[in-house]
Image: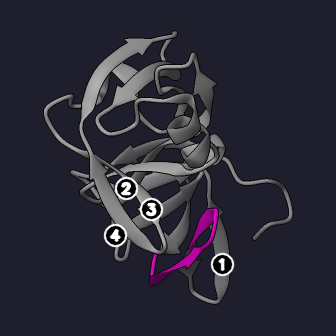
Amino acid sequence: MLQIAKILKSNGTDGGLLIGVRDIDVREIDLQEPVFIEFDGLPVPFFIRDLQPRGTAKAIIHLNDIDSLQDAEEVVGRALSIEGEWEEEEELDFTGWTLLNRGELVGTVTGMEPIPGNLCLYVGEAMIPLHEDLILSADPGSRTIDLDLPAGLL
C-alpha cells in the first residue's frame, strides 16, 4: 500500500472529507481505482464519488459508504492509501570511475557506502561524500566524476 494522503477533517454534513495529499499532485489520483482506509489493521477499499481539488496538495472528496458527518468523523486523521509501491530511483554505481577534484586526479572509486541521506565513495582508504552541491561534472561515457571537495577532506 502507498499512502497518498491524510484525512484532515470532515467537510459538511454529507460525508465530505478534506484530505492533504503527499508525494503526488491531487489531480493524479485515479478516480476509477479504489482508495483504502485502514480499520483494525486491515485496508478497506472505498471508491471516490467526487473529488474537488483545492490547489495541488488538498482536496474535498466524497467516498462511497461515507455519507454522513458521523461517518466522516470516524475516519478523520487516518491515512488514505492506494495499491502499489513507490518507484525507487535507480542508483548509479560509480565503482571503477575516475574521481577528480577540480580537474586533478584523486584516484579510482573502489566502492560505495549508502549512508542514509548521503552516498559516499571510497577511493583507497578515503571515504568521500557524494553530494549534488559538490559535483562539478560527471561523464558516464568516460566514467569520470569531477568534484569540488572542501579543503582538508583528502
Label 3 neighbour load within 10 Å: few <14, some 14-19, many 20+: some
Residue linked to disc 1: 127
Q: Amino acid at mark 3?
A: Glu
Q: CA distance from mark 2 to mark 4?
A: 28 Å
Residue linked to disc 3: 38
Q: Earlier in the sequence, mark 2 or mark 4?
A: 2
Callout in the foreground (2, 1): 2
Q: Is residue 24 above or below residue 46?
A: above
**Helix or strand or loop: what does disc 1 sit on?**
strand
As drawn, is 64 to the left or to the right of 111? left
Q: Amino acid at mark 1?
A: Met
**Helix or strand or loop: what does disc 3 sit on?**
strand
Q: Amino acid at mark 2?
A: Leu
As drawn, is 14 to the left or to the right of 140? right
Q: Residue at x 61, y 39 (%)?
A: 73
Q: Earlier in the sequence, mark 4 or mark 1?
A: 4
Q: Amino acid at mark 4?
A: Asp
Q: CA distance from mark 2 to mark 1?
A: 35 Å
Q: Residue at x 30, y 18 (%)?
A: 50
Q: Is residue 20 above or below residue 44?
A: above
Residue 2 disc label = 2
Segment colored magenta: 109-120
